[in-house]
Amino acid sequence: MDTLNLLMDGFASALTPINLLFAFAGVVLGTAVGVLPGIGPAMAVALLLPVTFGMETSSALIMFAGIYYGGMYGGSTTSILLNTPGESATVITAIEGHKMAKAGRASQALATAAIGSFVAGTIGTALLVTVTPIVVKFAVSLGAPSYFAIMVLSLVTVTAVLGSSKIRGFASLGLGLAIGLIGMDPVSGQKRLTFGFAPLVDGIDIVVVAVAVFAIGEALWIAAHLRLTPTRTIPVGTPWMGKEDWKRSWKPWLRGTAFGFPFGALPAGGAEVPTFLSYVTEKKLSKHPEEFGHGAIEGVAGPEAANNASAAGTLTPMLALGLPTNATAAVMLAFLTMKGIQPGPFLFENEPDLVWALIASLFIGNTLLLLINLPLAPLWARLLKIPRPYLYAGILFFATLGAFSVNMQVADLWILLLIGLLGFALRRFGLPVLPLILGVIIGPMAEEQLRKTFQLSAGSVSGIWSEPLAVGIYVLIAILLILPILISFIRRSRGIQSDLVETVLGEEQEPAKHQTELTNEKEQRVGKDES
Amino acid sequence: MTIVVGYIPSEEGEAALATAIDEAQRRNARLVVVNSSKGDQLVDDRLIDAKQYHELEARLTQSGVDFWIERKPQGIDAADQILQAAEAQRAQLIVIGLRKRTAMGKFLMGSVAQRVLLQAGCPVLSLKSSNDW
């Protein structure tokens, strides 16, 4: 009952005209950045940070939540119409969605994606309301060793389990942790990795890193690949669904939600695994398995619901533990820290108004998204015709402004450029960006918990496994790391390829997004030579 | 004798192409069809794809004129592309399609047609998509 009252208070503050306006601005912006490939909600939130300096914390957070959910909706539009997933969470949607669009069923694909996202987002947010207070109660009792273990778990899963290549993932994570180490040692006051350069003593701000990696890195990458042959969209009308489509969609929506939320809520995070699982399940359960691979509506409905439910789930560790598991949540937490609010289990106790206004705004944002996405899908697709030089000039402008406004020091601009080059290198060599960002933000947090652990155990290493939960998590990490090796070993020794293993490994071996683009480019070049 | 026509798959483009073919048949001239894109947009419907290329080729073959199609997916500005082709061929005539645009729209987006009209060294025939009176 208590929760419900708090939620109603949240609605009261989220439904004020000014907050409603920010929620609307957020969802519009979020859909826009979701539609444009290469620009995601994380970049948008990072770029908007300086704009929010003068704003109410709750209004800004409501806008960010709108961007976060909007990005998920927008991503599916590009996947379906262009077959270029805006982000990793919608890769699976593109498989069936684009086939549907090619077969002239783009409207139905867009409709099932939007309505499925709405259903999953609403159920997911409701689950968030019920689950998060329980997690908070549990989290308050956790000691430093358990926290450290949870952070290690999230870093390892994001790096080793979700990405396409473990070595690339760990390389990226290592870079992130190294950047996170720069600055003054929080305990001894020793300067680390500053190379005698004064502005580095305070460390590199997460905002500068995020803006550099997402905005500058992407802009450089696009600049290097600007002259690609343009693709063509598939013309669409207003999304709608027939009776048959509804009948085939509602079960996948619910099943997708069931997959998505728990995976998002785990401190491991990521929407890739639940979307993939949802796709495989729908393929197995479908009454029309022959349609899979040629545009089956279940293959769009399930994964789309899964990715939105996992987006809602991701907010659980973020609000309850102060632990981000994706880039957007990381930047949102950085924003809270900038505003002097300490994220963590005490957030619910210290800032109930803020948290519940945020959660209420998620319900509102989700409804707004359905309203602006369903009738306006063809309009959103037109965003793809913006000449990219204009678009990226604007992004670079806001990136520079944002990085400068954090500390008002010129040195930050040089750091921005340097890390931007690093971001370009990451894309060039196919390294995932997420481990780096999480390394930068979770690294110092994990260090703090590790230091506390050692202080409690008087410097003894055994302090790390002094809590039962911590031991359990380390065992889980060990299983996660060893299992894939074991599976491939068994497979090799038996010489039999089980169906599931094959599909799972086939998925893992799928090249990273930008690599796919590269091969496309090569194909196009070959195609041109022939003509 | 050469006629250069700027072609994009739109009503105006079709009108320009149809008139250019008529004109080429009448003057017994060679027709150069220019279709180009700067490649700066992620999605560009103005560039013809392989299917449209073959349809265009078939249509021109059927019309019996001597023709050449220039398709530049990563070219320079469309106006420059047309002017370059016209200059290289010492064209007698350039045919382009004009779309209706407000003064403000032109100010914001610039105009390929205006640049061709101003900078061409030969007569330019410009067409609207339909005859409104």
Image: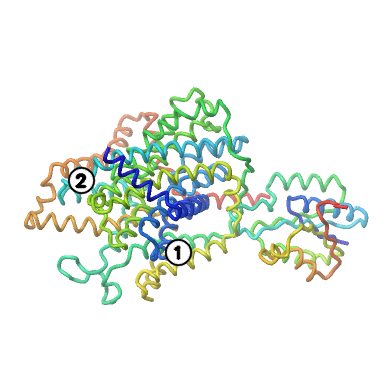
Decide which of A391, A489 is in the foreground and name it: A391
- Badge 1 marks a residue whose secondary structure is helix
- Numbered tag placed on residue A139 in the rendering: 2
Q: Amino acid at mark 1?
A: Ile
Q: How is the image coloured?
A: rainbow
Q: Which is more N-terminal, label 1 or label 2? A: 2
Identify the residue at horizontal 85%, vertical 61% (top origin). Answer: B125
Q: Is residue A511 visible?
A: no
Decide which of A7, A70 is in the foreground and name it: A7
Quarter of the figure with residue B79 = bottom right
Subunit of label 1: A
Identify the residue at horizontal 27%, vertical 70% (top origin). Answer: A202
Q: Amino acid at mark 2?
A: Ala
Subunit of label 2: A
Residue for badge 1: A216
The number of numbered discs placed on residues in the rendered structure image is: 2
Q: Is residue B61 visible?
A: yes
Looking at the rendered image, the disc whose residue lies closer to the viewer, 2 or 1, is: 2
Residue A335 in percent (x, y) is at 34, 59
* Residues at marks 2 and 1, CA–CA distance in whole angstroms: 37 Å
Horizontally, residue B48 falls left or right of residue A498, namely right
- Badge 2 marks a residue whose secondary structure is helix
Of the 4 image quadrants, the one containing the N terminus of chain A is: top left
Tell which residue pokes out farthest to the left in this image. A458
In the rendered image, residues at marks 2 and 1 fall on the same chain: yes
Decide which of A475, A119 is in the foreground and name it: A119
